[in-house]
Image (cartoon, helix red, strand yellow):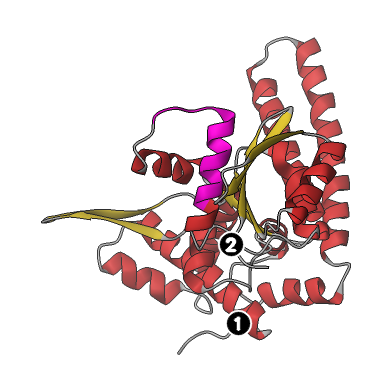
Amino acid sequence: MTHACAAGVDVGRDFFDVGLAPSGQVFRTANGPGGVLALVERLKRAGVSKVVLESIGGYAARLVRALAEAGFEVGVIDPKRIRALRIAEGKRAKTDRLDAKLIARFALIMQDAARPVPDAKAFEIRALSTRRRQLVEMAAMEKVRLKQTLDEAVADSCRQMIAILSEERARVEGRLQAELLATAERAGHAKLLQTIPGVGPAVSMTLLADLPELGRLDRKAIASLAGLAPHPNQSGTRTAQARIAGGRPCVRAALYMAAVSAARTDKGFKAEYQAMRQAGKPAKVALVAIARKIVVAANSMLKSNQPWIKAS
């Protein structure tokens, strides 16, 4: 198959509006198991090879998995990029059908619209990782409420809820770790990642679960996906400070904490951190740079299947 025919999907809670390019054809299916199967079969008959959706939450999760398993090239794109194409075309009207056609044109035009999609097991692992973070956040909120309450009955309720959430977190973490180490490949990757200074079991678990593309992209793409790529801001004689943006917040947070640890050890990135600080870089900027070095190194290590070696 070629990219002569591409599809764009406008995702809703109840329906999928699907546009085809370059034909401009549009149709609608239900957002449910039956609708997903019908949509996949219709795209196959239409000769579609690439399908693009907007990244708007969990309503498209079932469809993304089904498309990947069926062999389509799948792209989950920031809605801002789709909106930018509408502005570039000079159009103002917005409906679900028009959005589907617009996304399909985006899929046909943009060569980077599709990226490798993780397999079904990777989707399951990432869902477990998301659930773990949710439990951690809920427990943190209950702890804040416990500190603020003046009533013993409410305090006792908070303690019970914290205990329940902690127990469930431990269960989910155990399941997540078991899934991550279930295959020799993932277990080997975990060991390789933990050779990087600052990367322990928790950080390696986050990288494997929430950044399954690690080892399959180039260094710039993986840094951008982790939310650690600096974006320049220049116009004429004005040059503003480059800033990081986008990416996956959970991965960026884990790598930042790894950088804090790695910047304190001679075997890690202490020398690099001190050099940046002496050059006038703020502490956070230096730590973000180290976090970027860590994810780039991790990506290269998984590609080559070699442990981390400190550059001389």
Residue type at mark 1 is: Trp
Task: Tell me which segment is drawn in magenta.
Answer: 92-106
Question: Which mark is on residue 206?
Answer: none
Decide which of 54, 130 is in the foreground and name it: 54
The residue beneath circle 1 is 308
Task: For the C terminus, give its image quadrant.
Answer: bottom left
* Outermost residue, front side: 23
Looking at the image, is mark 1 or mark 2 nearer the viewer? 2
Image location (x, y in percent) of residue 180: 81, 63
Q: Quadrant of residue 133?
A: top right
Crowd rating for badge 1 (residues with CA inside 10 Å; few <14, some 14–19, many 20+): some
Question: Which mark is on residue 4?
Answer: 2
**Residue 133 in sight in this render:** no
Image location (x, y in percent) of residue 303: 64, 80
Image location (x, y in percent) of residue 235: 18, 53
Left or right of 307: which side holds 65? right
* Outermost residue, bottom side: 312
Q: Residue at x 80, y 25 (%)?
A: 159
State the SS at label 2: loop
Determine the CA span between mark 1 and mark 2. 43 Å
Is 296 a magenta residue? Answer: no
**Residue 300 in sight in this render:** yes
Residue type at mark 2 is: Ala
Left or right of 4: which side holds 43? right
Query: On screen, 5 above or below 103?
Result: below
Q: Quadrant of residue 150?
A: top right
State the SS at label 1: loop
